[in-house]
Amino acid sequence: MDLTAITFTELRYIVAVADTGHFGRAAERCHVSQPTLSTQVKKLEETLGVRLFERAARRVRLTAAGERIVARARVVLDEIRVIGDLARDQHEPLTGVLRLGVIPTLGPYLLPWLVPPLRRAFPRLRLALREAMTATLLDELMLHQLDAALVALPAAAPGLVAEPLFDEPFRVLAPPGHRLAKRARVREEDLRGERLLLLTEGHCLREQALALCGDGGAADSEFRATSLETLRHLVAAGMGCTLLPVLALTSLGEGRVVARPFRAPSPSRRIGIVWRRSFPGETGIRALASFIRARAPRTVSVVTAEAEARPRSPAGRQRARP
């Protein structure tokens, strides 16, 4: 077996086929013709002496050997990209491609104010954005499919580093005329007896809201929403109340819903950025973290070293200073 015959292009092709499950779509991703890609994949299989894919009419699946080989190919390709990143970082951080993940309850509200100034400040940076729930983003980080992710902390996993960015307080969203809408500030005990509309399982925001519900005596309703926008419209329709992070309150709809803050200390969630400990572009990630903190909206609280050390409840609640 002549392993020197294996090329980085062949590895890139098999990763693309594994990701898309289709030779045609993989060829489009790699900007080559399908016959060219298929020929190179077949050549690699012949070099290795194993079949990497089971070819069917509508779907291509990895063989057992293919799964292991593609996993290692991802690491090899990532290391090649790292070499380029290391060279660029010596001259200028945040250049080239940054594969950044973001959770769905944050992305639509953070990215509009983050991306435009980031592009102006770092014109040579190309963001490849991926929106998914926390568990998926952490898996993709470990598989070298992402470089970093913006998530709610804690988001611990072996081999990952997390740096907090800001604390985002919750607001109670209620229909006009609701008893909670009549209060200037809501206490946690005011939630007692309320059945709150929440997101589906898997959203970290759901778990944070459930922790707060339990503390306040509220209960989870039987409804499950897939987005904060759905929750907003259901509240406007008079179906109940919910909790939203403050960045999601950009367009409530005049008179349709009422947002009320909590009485201090306000419950909040901590947003941070996570990346692999082995990722060589740490300088760029920390530069991005500093950029976000410097331009964070006034409605959130930037996390300083002092704030980071402050005790927090399981629901992500900040305690008042002594």
Image (cartoon, grey):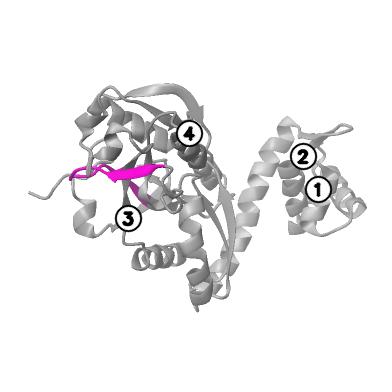
**Residue at coordinates 31% horizontally, 62% vertically from top-left?**
298
**Residue at coordinates 43% horizontally, 50% vertically from top-left?**
254
Above-or-below relation of 256 to 62: below
> Disc 4 or 3, which lies upstream in sequence?
3
Quadrant of residue 192 in the image?
A: top left
Q: Is residue 42 magenta?
A: no
Q: Residues within 10 Å of mark 3 (few under 14, many from 20)?
A: many
> Disc 1 or 4, which lies upstream in sequence?
1
Q: Is residue 264 magenta?
A: yes
> Disc 4 or 2, which lies upstream in sequence?
2
Which residues fall within the magenta stretch?
Answer: 257-271
Q: Position of residue 234 (x, y in %)?
A: 48, 34
Numbered label attached to residue 166? 3
Q: Residues within 10 Å of mark 4 (few under 14, many from 20)?
A: few
Is 39 situated left or right of 232 in this image? right
Q: In the rendered image, is residue 291 in sight?
A: yes
Q: Residues within 10 Å of mark 2 (few under 14, many from 20)?
A: some
Numbered label attached to residue 25? 1
Residue denoted by label 4? 237
Q: Position of residue 99 (x, y in %)?
A: 57, 57
Residue denoted by label 2? 21
Quadrant of residue 158 in the image?
A: top left
| Marks 1/2: CA–CA distance | 8 Å
Looking at this view, name the residue that lies furthest to the bottom.
91
